[in-house]
Image: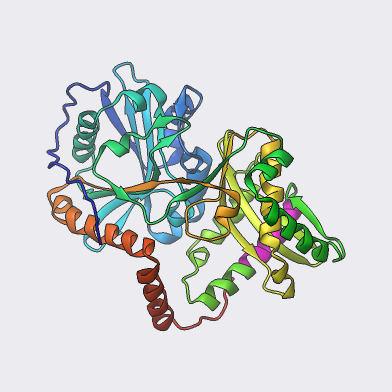
Amino acid sequence: MNIALRMSPPLVPTRDLPGSALARIDVFDDVDSAAPAWDELATADSVASPYQSREWVRLWQSHVLPRSGGHLLILVGRDATGAPLFVWPLVRGRLGPLRIAAFVGGKHATINMPLWRRDVAQAWTASDLHDVLRSIAARVPDLDLIILCNQPFAWHGTANPFALLPHFRATEDNFVAPLGLPGAQVVEREISSAMRSRLRNKERKLSKLPGYRYVRAQTPDAVRAQLDAFFAQKSAKLAAMGVQNVFAGPGIEDFVRAACLDGLGEGRALIELHALEADGEILALFSGINDGRRFTSNFNSHTMSEHARFSPGLILMQYMIANVADRGFESFDIGPGEAHYKSFFCKTLEPLFDSVIPLSPRGRLIAWPLRLTLAAKSAIKRNSVLWAIASRVRRVLRPTQAPTS
């Protein structure tokens, strides 16, 4: 197994930031306090993935953190005039004896680049970032590590500055499709004629069901009905697989429900829902989050009834891609994770990377073995033989659970 790691130099805490546009870092523990800087930067020429939006972080703070024991750590960098250069929303927690910070949303945030002023992201060097990290270490002296997962190397053509620091390949790549054409043309271009033919034949079977339709949820009642089905389907599926249900965590269901309703009345739900329905049954569901240019699929589920054999999830994916293309989005991604169906629709693999950034002496001591452990996990998951063995072991060690909602 070949694992490539790049070591970082020790970080010596200091408040001096030589050779950098950064004048100071403000530290906040709630969204409202950071909101003025956040809004100022978000409405300027800036770049960020949608999982770092103020709305996402606010709902996570409201519904998840009070029940999980985590705490917000929002870092705002400013220049000499006080204008914001970046906003890094993180969650503080513990990893054994270590005090760590990570992106808000955990496994539910599938691609992460925090908010940067675009010219800063393009111009900063590794030296500038090390200066920032030294300042953070001085401002937050009890923080040992920052662990950043599922980061893109660029977002809308702007390089991710964290790629200048030591990093390693994430466990899974992302699957992306360019849009830029009307939906019907995108579907024809991205999906093979043989696959489209197979899906048409399968949809003919489903179309005989009473009330069969594709729908994007646009009312609270539709959101609630689709999510009720999603949580039941996902719980049953994960239990059958012997996989931990990440949606059963403290506050997660309330967060998802709130995020699907947030902005719904204005036609811009934070998480939007697309479903294939028949009367009394959600055949398949996909969700998505966007920044106005790129649409990123999030969670999904499908029926476990006999109708599953007609591939409702694949049929739904066609409708969803056509919908977001017709609405003017530039690209669509299904999200990271190895699943054969993803390559039917999204042919471009977008590599993602993870970072383990030490801030304290204790953090520097553990950073190397932690990087090695996480990189090894990534290598195992990318090796089909090793991952099959690991999956069998996991099923043996985790007996089938009763479904929960």
Can you say which quadrant of the picture contains the N terminus? Answer: bottom left
Tell which of 76 and 382 is nearer to you: 382
Residue 119: percent from left, percent from top: 38, 21
Q: Is residue 144 left or right of residue 351?
A: left
Q: Which residues are magenta?
A: 220-232
Tell which of 360 and 123 is nearer to you: 123
Where 123 sits versus 238, above or below?
Answer: above
Residue 217: percent from left, percent from top: 73, 50
Where 64 sits versus 391, above or below?
Answer: above
Occupied quadrant, residue 65: bottom left
Q: Reply yes or no: does residue 348 show up in magenta.
A: no
For this orientation, the residue located farthest to the top is: 81
Q: Residue at x 68, y 69 (%)?
A: 303
Q: Residue at x 65, y 50 (%)?
A: 192
Tell which of 178 and 268 is nearer to you: 178
Tell which of 106 and 326 is nearer to you: 326
Let me know if residue 267 appears in the view.
Answer: no
Residue 183: percent from left, percent from top: 71, 40
